[in-house]
Image: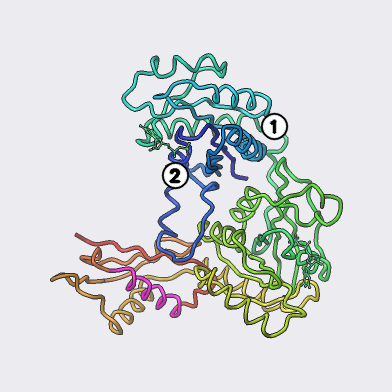
């Protein structure tokens, strides 16, 4: 499970600046996709080989004074409850404020490691910028500049070290390796996730039962369908919900993100009997950002008039256009209909994500594409593409080599992507095209 870091602090101390710095590497993949809504309060980051999730607790409008504290307390509580450690930001230029003390009092009760971090400290002396904050009683402050990056890698490594150090030894035991494709079923509450899980597990022979969860309840449930092995990642506890835990389990972005990151293929469930909501789009955005293979199930397809069916198709096309690379299936988890083809798409999405594309085949496909349609000149410059090789898997990365490739526009890049997708049947996985110019 990825460690979870919450960024806490009053408005304007630099939480979103730090958040953006920590999660920025992910943006390249999704930068130019129209229609994508991303919840910028949750993101994934990586420092060296160490991945983590980060939650920004900002983003509320400071209206009335009481309103601020109330809203801050609510958001902060939720985030801190889901986090393994807290980065508590204060503003080194402004110095200490009463709000900082209120937050400190709250954090003291939260039972999580708290790192006090003085931001905006670029060009300032450690002793002068930190002096104010010893009064908070949180020990030696760390000093960073979120805007410039100073001190940020050290801070993150320190947080991750502290999280690792507090893990009890007994949960270190690795679970048995999963068999088959690892599937995470994600979606907002009530779309039918538990119903689908029960349909998948109940009907076919369940090979093993729940393993006791770790602290954060990541459960892998192996199952078999049509003679093939799969493993369901149930981080969000969807299997048990609907029984005892119904009342207390709430939708958790963190658990959704954890499930996505542990899966090979994500199955996004939507509810055909409701409009596509902002929450659906947010979850879809997370999946896209993760680079995972994806299949979409539009559930509760039973009992809909054909007008309703047309309307939901239009709604999806409009709001989730950025998932164009995935297969969509109209299913009924309740009636067990449409599940067979859905599982076939899961198989092929996985195969596409893991595809091995040789340099000769890629180069041939590239030449075909260029023969069919040349990239446009930019002024007097004509980009020249020479060959392509595979730069990575899951998602596949196709690296194109040549000269003056800076001059290739996004339209042409999309054209190439489409051509590679068709040539190699890469349905169900994001695909990245990278251009590398020789000189
Ligand atoms: P948030 O409300 O806590 O999310 O704060 P923001 O990230 O929106 O930052 C508030 C303001 O502080 C913005 O104008 C940022 O540009 C500025 N800021 C953030 N980090 C730094 C920093 O390291 N140094 C300086 N000088 N300004 C910063
Ligand atoms: P979850 O919160 O995503 O796990 O959703 P549940 O599996 O608990 O389902 C929410 C509600 O939708 C329940 O009342 C289910 O009986 C109902 N439901 C689930 N799948 C279907 C379906 O395919 N068709 C219909 N009509 N209802 C369904």
Direction front: furthest residue: 64
| Looking at the image, residue 29 lies above or below residue 200 | above
- The residue sitting at 58% across, 35% down in the picture is 68
Q: Which residues are magenta?
A: 409-423
Would you say residue 417 sits in the magenta stretch? Answer: yes
Q: How would you rate the neighbour count of disc 2 (Cα within 10 Å): few for under 14, some for 14-19, many for 20 or more? A: many
Tally of numbered tags = 2
- In the rendered image, residue 384, in percent from the top left (x then y), is placed at 22, 71
- The residue sitting at 23% across, 66% down in the picture is 407
| Looking at the image, residue 409 lies above or below residue 236 | below
- In the rendered image, residue 304, in percent from the top left (x then y), is placed at 73, 80
Q: How would you rate the neighbour count of disc 1 (Cα within 10 Å): few for under 14, some for 14-19, many for 20 or more? A: few
Direction left: furthest residue: 380
Give the residue pinned by disc 2.
20
In which quadrant is the C terminus drawn? bottom left
Please state which of residues 374 and 282 is positioned toward the viewer in this rendering: 282
Q: Is residue 150 left or right of residue 280?
A: left
The quarter of the image that holds ligand 2 is: bottom right
Give the residue pinned by disc 1.
168
- The residue sitting at 29% across, 82% down in the picture is 373
- In the rendered image, residue 181, in percent from the top left (x then y), is placed at 64, 64
| Residue 48 seen in the current view | no
Please state which of residues 113 and 123 is positioned toward the viewer in this rendering: 123
Asked which secondary structure carries label 1, the reply is loop
Asked which secondary structure carries label 2, the reply is helix
């Amino acid at each position: 499970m990825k460690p979870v870091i919450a960024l806490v602090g009053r408005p304007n101390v630099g939480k979103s600046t730090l958040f953006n710095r920590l999660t920025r590497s992910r943006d390249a993949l999704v930068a130019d996709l129209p229609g994508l809504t991303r919840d910028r309060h949750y993101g994934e980051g990586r420092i060296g080989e160490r991945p983590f999730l980060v939650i920004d607790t900002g983003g509320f409008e400071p209206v009335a004074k009481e309103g601020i504290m109330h809203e801050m307390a609510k958001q902060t509580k939720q985030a801190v409850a889901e986090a393994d450690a807290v980065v508590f930001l204060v503003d080194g230029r402004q110095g200490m404020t009463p709000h900082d003390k209120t937050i400190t009092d709250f954090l003291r009760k939260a039972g999580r490691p708290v790192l006090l971090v003085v931001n905006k400290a670029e060009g300032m002396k450690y002793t002068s910028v930190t002096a104010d904050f010893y009064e908070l009683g949180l020990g030696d402050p760390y000093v960073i500049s979120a805007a410039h990056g100073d001190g940020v890698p050290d801070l993150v490594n320190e947080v991750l070290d502290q999280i690792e150090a507090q893990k009890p030894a007994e949960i270190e035991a690795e679970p048995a390796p999963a068999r088959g494709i690892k599937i995470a079923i994600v979606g907002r509450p009530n779309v039918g996730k538990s119903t689908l899980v029960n349909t998948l597990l109940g009907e076919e022979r369940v090979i093993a039962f729940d393993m006791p969860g770790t602290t954060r309840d990541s459960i892998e449930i192996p199952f078999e369908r049509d003679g093939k092995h799969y493993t369901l990642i149930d981080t969000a506890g969807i299997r048990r919900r609907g029984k005892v835990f119904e009342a207390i389990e709430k939708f958790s972005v963190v658990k959704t993100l954890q499930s996505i990151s542990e899966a090979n293929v994500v199955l996004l469930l939507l509810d055909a009997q409701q409009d596509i909501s902002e929450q659906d789009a947010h979850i879809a955005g997370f999946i896209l950002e993760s680079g995972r293979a994806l299949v979409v199930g539009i559930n509760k397809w039973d009992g809909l008039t054909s007008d309703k069916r047309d309307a939901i198709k239009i709604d999806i096309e409009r709001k989730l256009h950025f998932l164009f690379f995935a297969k969509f299936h109209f299913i009924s988890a309740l009636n067990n209909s449409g599940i067979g083809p859905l599982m076939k798409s899961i198989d092929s999405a996985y195969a596409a994500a893991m595809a091995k594309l040789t340099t000769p085949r890629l180069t041939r496909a590239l030449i075909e594409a260029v023969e069919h349609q040349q990239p446009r000149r930019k002024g007097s410059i004509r980009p020249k593409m020479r060959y392509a090789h595979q730069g990575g898997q899951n998602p596949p990365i196709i690296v194109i080599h040549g000269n003056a490739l800076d001059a290739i526009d996004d339209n042409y890049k999309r054209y190439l992507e489409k051509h590679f997708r068709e040539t190699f049947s890469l349905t169900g996985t994001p695909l990245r095209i990278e251009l590398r110019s020789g000189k």
